[in-house]
Image: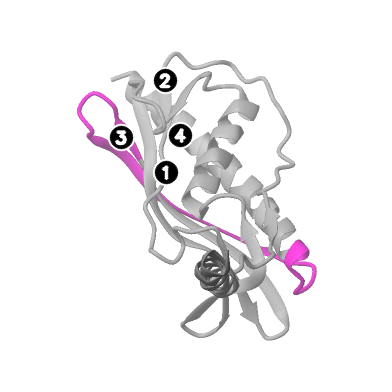
Amino acid sequence: MKRAYRMIAPLAFALMSACSILPKADPSDVYRLASAQPVSQGAPVSWSLRVTKPQTSEFLDSPRIAVVPNGDLISSYANSRWSDPAPVLLRNRLLDGFQRDGRVTLLSTDETNLQADYELGGQLQAFQSEYHGTAVEVVIRLDARLVRGSDQRIIASRRFEVRQQAGDTKVPSVVAAFGQAGDQLNRQVVDWVVAQGNTAAKH
């Protein structure tokens, strides 16, 4: 019995030691990209659209809430993160924008293998807050591309940039400013895609 105890005791100690050195998850607040975009019922188009995740930098391709405190330094808010990486957030937000707008009803994303007449993608250049003195401004910059689904030919491209000042420097205010900037971006992108898609569909 004593021999068995001598064998079990070091094993138990080792397991306890291993548990004590395992990294502990940092508590963090998880934020969604909220929307206040109204629902409308525009005249539906006849073509379909696939909304894809934009490409982006390694830093932005994460759930971190990016902030540029000064100059070329990019960091992130401590103990706060997005519910998804920024490209996924933006793709889902754009998809929701098209659904709320009501004109493009045949919608899919790059999470499925469904074919579509057109694909919306591009490069996410900025998705961050920036300090200007004591003021904080949210910046979303998207180089959008509209591609024909049948042959991947680019039919239109455009840079979109929206800026929205936050009420204060606290994270909830910054997140609210992201939501407002997202609404602005949605309106611009949806109108542009519908116009370009309708023009291309006539040819």
Query: What's the CA distance linking mark 2 and mark 3?
Result: 12 Å
Residue at the location (45% across, 34% down)?
193
First in sequence, mark 2 or 3: give its number. 2
What is the quadrant of residue 92 in the picture? top right
Residue 91: x and y, percent?
50, 42
First in sequence, mark 2 or 4: give its number. 2
Specify the color scheme.
one colour
The quarter of the rendered structure image containing the N terminus is bottom right
First in sequence, mark 3 or 4: give its number. 3
Marks 3 & 4, CB-CB < 8 Å contact = no
- Queried whether the magenta region covers residue 125, the answer comes back as no
Residue nearer the viewer, 184 or 18: 18
Task: Name the front one of labels 1 and 2.
Answer: 1
Horizontal side of 143 relative to 11 (left or right) equals left
Looking at the picture, which amino acid does disc 2 mark?
Ser
Looking at the picture, which amino acid does disc 1 mark?
Lys
Q: Residues within 10 Å of mark 2 (few under 14, many from 20)?
A: some
Query: What's the CA distance linking mark 3 and mark 4?
Result: 10 Å
Q: Which residue is mark 2?
A: 48
Q: Residues within 10 Å of mark 4 (few under 14, many from 20)?
A: many
Query: What's the CA distance linking mark 3 and mark 1?
Result: 13 Å
Magenta segment range?
146-173
Query: What's the CA distance linking mark 1 and mark 2?
Result: 17 Å
Q: Residues within 10 Å of mark 1 (few under 14, many from 20)?
A: many
